[in-house]
Amino acid sequence: MAAFLAGVWLIAAPPVLHFGASLHAFRPYWWSMGLAVVVMLLGMVRAMAPLDVPLAQPITIGLAVGLIVVALIRTDGGTAAVWLNQLVVGGLIALSAGLAFLISMRR
């Protein structure tokens, strides 16, 4: 559930934190918003049927690392607030998915 909510926030964050983003058609944020949609879908799957898709947690961790990498290599005009938000939310997604993965491995 945390990954789903984090994905919703990642999609909502550019217009909230950078009001001028709509002037540039969200160009700096397409990668992070696309990854956020996939994280949201995996978060819904993990919340509804966690035992049916055992690879959902490692895939979510990989996507969270992808979010962090996209934030670190950004060269197009995103704001620092959105960049920092993406780093923090990507880290939180990776941490929550990693903890869920470790708990499921112990069982």
Image (cartoon, rainbow, N blue to C red):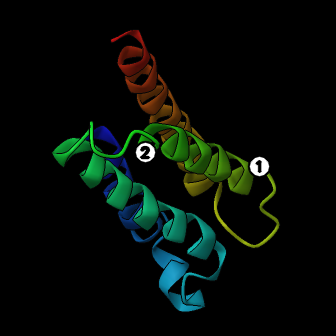
What distance separates the C-alpha of mark 2 from that of mark 1? Answer: 24 Å
| Residue under label 1 | 72
| Residue under label 2 | 56
Q: From this viewpoint, is residue 84 visible?
A: no
| Vertical arrangement, residue 79 with respect to residue 5, above or below | below
In this rendered view, identify the residue nearer to me: 78 or 93: 93
In this rendered view, identify the residue nearer to me: 58 or 53: 53
Q: From this viewpoint, is residue 58 visible?
A: yes
Residue at image coords 59%, 71%: 29
Q: Residue 43 location, x and y as percent?
A: 32, 49
Split into 4 quadrants, where in the image is the N terminus? top left
For label 1, the SS is helix
Q: Earlier in the sequence, mark 2 or mark 1?
A: 2
Amino acid of disc 1? Leu
Graded by Cα atoms within 10 Å as few (under 14), some (14 to 19) or many (20 or more), the crowding at tag 1 reads few
For label 2, the SS is helix
Q: Are marks 2 and 1 in contact (CB under 8 Å)?
A: no
Residue at the outermost top position: 106
Split into 4 quadrants, where in the image is the C terminus? top left
Q: Residue 16 location, x and y as percent?
A: 38, 64
Tell me if 102 is positioned left or right of 72 in this view: left
Q: Residue 32 location, x and y as percent?
A: 57, 64
Tell me if 18 is positioned left or right of 46 in this view: right
In this rendered view, identify the residue nearer to me: 52 or 12: 52
